[in-house]
Image (cartoon, grey):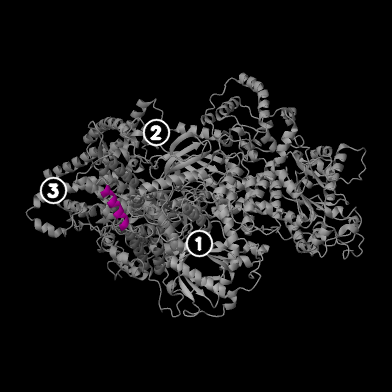
Amino acid sequence: MARLADYYLVVTYDLDKRAEGEGQGRILQRFPEKDWEDSPFPQGIELFCQPSGWQLVPERQPASFFVAVLTDINSERHYCACFTFWEGLDNPQLQKAAGEVDEADDELTVVQPAKVFAPKSLVLVSRLDHTEVFRNCLGLIYTVHVDGLTVPMETVVGNLLTCVIPIAGGSQRTITLGAGDRQVIQTPIDDALPVSGSTVAQLFRQLGIVNVLYLFCAALTEHKILFLSSSYQRLTDACRGLLAIMFPLKYSFTYVPILPGKLLEVLSTPTPFIIGVNSFFRSETQELLDVIIADLDGGTVTIPECVHISLLPEPLLQQTQTLLSMVLDPELEVADHAFPPLSTQPSALKIQDKEIRGVFLWLFARLFQGYRWCLHIIRIHPEPVIRFHKAAFLGQRSLTEDDFLMKVLDGMAFAGFVSERGPPYRATDLFDDLVANHVERIRQEETCPHKVMNHVKELAEKLFKNENPYPAVAMHKVQRPSENSQNNARSQTPFPMLDEVTVELFIDHAAAKLKTAPPVVKAELMGMVPSGPPLGDTVDRNGNVMANSARRLEVVRNCITYIFENKMLEAKKLMPAVLRALKGRAARVCLTQELNQHVLQNRAVLDDQQFDYIVRMMNCTLQDCSHIDEHGIAAALLPLVTAFCRKMGAGITQFAYSCVQEHMVWATMQFWEAMFYTDVQSHIRALYLETEEGEQHNNHDERDGLGDGREISALELASEQSRLWPTLSKELQTERVQKEESTVFSQAIHYANRMSYLLLPLDTSKNRMLRSTGLVDVESVSNSYVTNSIAGSMAESYDTESGFEDAESSDVANSVVRFINRFVDKVCNESGVTNEHLKALHTMIPDIVQMHIETLDAVHRESKRLPPIQKPKLLRPTLLPGEELVMDGMRVHLIPDGREEAMGLMGGPPLLPAEGAIFLTTYRLIFKGTPNDPLVGEQVVTRSFPIASLTKEKRISVTLPMDQFIQEGLQLRSCTFQLMKIAFDEEVASDLAEIFRKHMHKLRYPQHVQGTFAFTVGQCGKMVVEHKTKDKNQSLKTLSKNLVKSAKRTIGRQYVTRKKYSPPTWENRSSFQSELDEDEISVSEEVDQSSLTLSSTMRSSDRQTMSNVVERACCRDYQRLGLGTLSNSLTRSKNEPFRISTVNRIYTVCRSYPGLLIVPQSIPDTTIQRICRCYRQNRFPVVCWRNPRTKGVLLRSAGLHAKGVVGFFKSPNTPASGPSQADSISLEQEKYLQAIISSMPSYSESSGRNTLSGFTSTHMSTSDSSDKLRQPKIGALMKQVMGAKEEAPGNFSRGALGQRAKVISLSQPKVSGKARNTPRGKWGSIRGSGRLSAYNPDVGTRLAGKESPQPNGGPSEALFLRQQKAYLYIIGDKAQLKGGKQDSFQQWEVVPIEVCDVRQVKNSFKKLMKACVPSSSTSDPNMSFLRCLEESEWMALLHRVLQVSVLVVELLDSGSSVMVSLEDGWDVTTQVVSLVQLLSDPYYRTFDGFRLLVEKEWLSFGHRFSHRGAQTLGSQNSGFTPVFLQFLDCVHQIHLQFPMEFEFSQYYLKFLAYHYVSNRFRTFLLDSDYERIELGVLYEEKGERKSPQVCKSVWDYIDRLNKKTPVFYNYMFSPEDEEVLRPYTFNSNLKVWDFYMEETLSEGPSYDWELRDQQERTAEETLDKADCGGPKSQRHIVWPCYDSLSKVVPDAITKLLQDLQSLEAELGQTSEKWKDTWDKIKAAQRTESKLESKPSFSSSLLMSSNLSHQRRSQGVYLQESGVGSSINLAMDHETSATSTPVAGRPSTSTLYSQFQSTESENRSFEGILFKKGALLKPWKPRWFVLDKTKHQLRYYESRQDKECKGVIELADVESVIPGTPTMGAPKNIEEKAFFDLKTTKRVYNFCAQDSQKAQLWMDSVQSCLSDA
């Protein structure tokens, strides 16, 4: 029972204590005067009566009522019901003014009313919350006063204060205050359930579903919530509603439904709260940054930006929202129905309120289901101590990721929930019932809202019944004040003071009565709280059980069995699968169970390897455990890691825990607490089970029945014990308390030990735990593992600062002691351990730790002695002859990069990561090893690249999946499109890795080009590495430099001048080389200008050099092209337009040009020396090719110097003050160009400039037809090339040009000379302002052959005077051609184009490498291969180069000459010029021609290979720029489009691409002929070689190889004479070169053939050894990234040639060269294809095509690697371009083909003969039929065969003669059985079964012949 009201008081306005405008209240009277003992009087009630402040008002206001809530120091809530009315009084302001006139102002600003009204409040303070009852009671008191009822006020108040009602139990009480009133109070049935009236429903109405859910989640996750409203009662109701839906959690923070204005600073408290404030103070709440504000009147909830509210987990959130909308807005569901039900009104507010609360109860039941299974009971007596195992709960519910639940479980409310609902023996309520008995129902119904709704309605009914146990209550009778009395004059009388004595008497009287009354005891029903069904193994978050987990568990079990049965090889194979499986939770649980069984079977002592495996599995299991260990894996492993061990000799044992310490779970306090409590619970359970069994063993059977055959849980035991507790005697009780306490204490000691095991590292001098952010609640620790003896053997390299060992180790001990102490304090205090015990523990812990440290030291010492783990042995790489190791192999791991094939993502087992060694040789960087995956462990993985191609090296840190060490590694990228990511094994010391890097750098960037492999090959490798002999003394160094300068020159001389140059023997060479190295002489030093001319170093006459130069490739080519001979000037015929000039023979004119140059006949050498100064690098225009048909020439030069441009284009008639030098030079330049133009027959034949006569030169007219075809194309091409980058390739400009520049085909491209006099447009008004409209429109029109309008506006003469095309086009760089004017008379035109800068190429190449060989795989769509390829712009650059080249080809083919004059003349110029020659001249598409082209245009004309390839230290900064690679890629693109035009294969191009950067050959070293001569490299190839195995020139090497193998040959080569190729150049026509993408992991790059042979040999040897095994499969798996496809799957022709060779070898014949064989076959095939009656489809297709360009390029497309369908494919077909049969008489077979031969007819003679096939085919038995009628010999596969295999026309047979057996003939047959049939085409060899048969055949055939 409880008092209805504790205190009654009257509060009034305090007139005495008025501050300015701020009034105060004071308590007028209070009853009772003394405080009750059980509830003290709350302070500060005056503030709460008028929360907005006490004020006087001019008008009377209606009486108001609200309930405020105060919380006292014991967190008890007191409900203050305030009833306020207003009393009039005289205005105190006026009185004051009258009293103190002198001080007041003269005029009063405001007119004050005479009467004002002051508030007066009647207040009830109660601990019960009966709002309506309070309202009625206070109203009654007011009514008594106002209406002047006869009842004395004291009686009413006395009755009110003495009224006692029950708190709960569902009773109903009628009360009366003695004023003729009667009220019925119903108490709720269950006090635990909150009473809400209709407040919850109101809250939802005001704010809406989503907003309330936000507030609900915010309150549960401890945010600050502030309600605003202008109504006080609504604030109280809203707060009460919010608390009601939080049930069963209770809100335990600041709760003030109505906060007075004076206390607003409470809002800035840091703790969470729920507070209500009047909207009047809204502005003060604006600056609160972290408060969620709910405006009840406006219906909004404002969440500040910095606040993140975790919402309910899905799908709960969605389901809850659905249910709430079904309650609040039932019409929503049927709103769209055609026939909506008649009534879908929501329930009445009171019912709706309970329905909403039902939804939240259902929600909590789902959130907390199974919570009781995660309670740990630590103590039962004297009262239960219970802890909740949060991690286990989250783990079993698979909600570890869920933010909301984590926060709720960590919150104060839940802690209260556990302490209140944890005890197993107590009264239960609705929630307990729901969460225990309805879980199954909830789970089944959760997806069906209507079923859930029914459940919610049942809950709502119970809740409603709880609040309103007696439905029909109509007994209220409370008087209200009459209407008139509120306003009449009587109410002016102030509220009377009560007689205190009377009231006190009432109260005392009632108290005395209560004491004498017997106590009303309503026994509370205590009982065991049901736990509900246990939490099953719920599925993981996404709702799917781990796939095929049964199979995985099987693997784990098998592996463990193998380990314990010592089948290590089997275990090793399963290991990777096991480690993968252990990612899943089921497998981890399975592992702990399996290991546990082995411990129980006493198998815990292991040998080294077993131990290693077990530890690895444990580490892998722990690695994925979070630090809270939600699945209890670490908990299950904890006993195991202290059980498994290995003996280490000398009585020392190492336990597994010393190898699994590196996991953060061990340093987490929560984990240890949970573990401790679990163990304590099981011990206490055991304790009571024993006592029970002791007491009850006699009635054992009953207990079994009771237990239902399952174990009694600890909670059930505890509940039973709590029930029995009051019945025990005092002694028994204390005994039990002591037993429990000592159980806890012993566990604490045990855990102190366990913790020291897992926290103290093996090597206690290294504090591993401290280093990884220490034991201070660790959140993240590196999850590396230490396995087996690594822990010991590698411990030294953990960290090398051993100077502070003592300090460190004590540090470890201290930190561990501190950690354990903190743990012990916490758990012992919570579980009630006595203080003495706690002190004992604190003294024990340091000893435990110290003792453990000592045992560990011994273990650590022993572990160092362990033999290191068996690692795969390092494989040696095969080296080239002359290649030597610089550093022996270092054990490394090759880590997968972004290429997916090797990682097994495209199928197949992963080849990477692999373990092996990295070798550094003088030539390459080689990795060789075996994959980590045991399924492919037998394969060998090789990756290598030439050290010279290394472009980038960076350090990386790598985590290996197997050993979890973070290791240092290197990422090495090479421009041969190879990437090596290596991680050094822990056995490699870090300084070794550093030495490796240094050596690598030294080899990559030698001081001088002589340090590269091509020069040092075969010399002692040491010299390359040991540069330590260098003299440190600076002055000596410089001295030696000067001394050796002269020596150097003589050396140079020796190199250059001897014709027969014999290289010094290797010994001498090495010594003098090292001499050079020591003194750091490098020829590229800047010597003074004069000494650089070669003349100073040449002793013997120039003639010798000249004869060498003549032998150079260029000269042979010039003579082939008819560009001049080197005969004396006298005998030289004058009419040759060009001559070979020797002006540069000693490289004085231009350092980077060759010695011999082609210049116009008419230009003397002196002029050349002057002209060259206008051009960059002195690279003046020289002829490099002449079109044999049109005699147009191709010239190359560098761009002009900036100053030269203007001079070049100055019109000659500008008035000059004097003939300046520039003028004369520009005139000579013009003369030079004019001389070139004059050399063209088309020009010279026109004999002079202005005649019309000579324009019909013969060759021009012959080329008309071709010109007609080609002319329009040039115009279009021109537009494309000149168009700025942004332009689409088809339109020439955006300006006025667009209309005029239409392409018109020329019918006759000749033009009268007069046309030249008309002023005409130039190639691009060279002001190129960047806008294309600045171009002169005539440029394009003239090229397109369109007339230009006459300047005088008259009709153009174009009909008969076509515009002349220029004789010479100069392709120049747009950027350089600014600001010049062109003379109207000159016959050349400048085509300005944009070229790609070298920097662009460099950057583009970098991006291309990253695209083709990414360093790491990514799922980012912006990083996909195609996207990266596009961003690299490599294809765009190829497009540009090809486009310009095709334009030049067109111009040359149309009869003009072209001069390519771009940049410095050695990059883009070289590319364009080479491609033009390749496209125009078929000779360059052969082996010899291509070699010549490269030697001439790239090597002789000085492309700077060393500089662009960054081959030496000096050029290191310039970076790698693959200009030559770009050219090869262009050739590859052309090759793809014209597969039949090239003699060489694609492989040939790849070979060059690889070796031009590899530095294996000297060919591509150095920057010009001059440098090569200076080093003596150029002509030494002619000298005899000392060591034949070292090839110095790549060309020689290719020649040799080509003789051996057809790998460079293109079988489809069948060129057409004089074919000019015009490839498509658009990006869509270009393909990515597979050179960039392919990789052969089995053997590394295939471009060093010696290695291939050696590898094949070793492979065969190993195969021979392995053969003794079981049967071998004939099948072979081909992996695209592993095997060399050309080797494993060769194309048909290569395969046949190989077979032929091997057969010849078997028969011991000398095999002929493949080329001879191939040529024979081609010849034979030509004849046979005419013979065969049925040519195969493919050959006829090839033969019949007219082989025009388009058809050829898209005709049969046999790629190198593809398997050809038949040999006929690639045969020559010059012989028959059409498919008509050979001329002559029609073949007989065609005559007879209409008759269908049958079995019987026409068979004159038949039988079996062996026939020898064509050249490559073996002898085969065939069924031959001699047919006299058709006059032919037919043969079939067999007798039954209808399909004829072949026919020999007897008409062609010349003779039949006896033959001799040849190779491959059938064995055991006499010689006479052979005979030969000779036809006009070939000889057929036959063999019969014996000599008689042979004779018969010969006779039959002979008779046929004679008949004919």
- For label 3, the residue is 690
**Residue 772 x %, y %:** 39, 37
For disc 3, the neighbor class at 10 Å (few under 14, some 14 to 19, many from 20) is few
Tell me the distance, in whole angstroms, between the alpha carbons under discs 3 and 1.
Answer: 109 Å
Res 1371 seen here: no
Residue placed at 70% from the left, 28% from the top?
1087
Image vertical order of residue 1347 relative to residue 222, above or below: below
Tell me the distance, in whole angstroms, between the alpha carbons under discs 3 and 2.
Answer: 51 Å
- For label 2, the residue is 798
Front tag of 2 and 1: 1
Kind of residue at disc 2: Tyr
Kind of residue at disc 3: Glu
Front tag of 3 and 1: 1
For disc 1, the neighbor class at 10 Å (few under 14, some 14 to 19, many from 20) is some
Secondary-structure class at tag 3? helix
Nearer to us in this view, 1166 or 1867: 1867
Labels 2 and 1: the sequence-earlier one: 2
**Residue 723 x %, y %:** 16, 53
Secondary-structure class at tag 2? helix
Res 693 seen here: yes
Residue placed at 57% from the left, 78% from the top?
1792
Q: Which residues are magenta?
A: 550-562
State which quarter of the image contains the N terminus.
Answer: bottom left
State which quarter of the image contains the C terminus.
Answer: bottom right
Residue 557 in magenta?
yes
**Residue 84 x %, y %:** 42, 57
- For label 1, the residue is 1859
Nearer to us in this view, 87 or 225: 225
**Residue 1060 x %, y %:** 65, 33
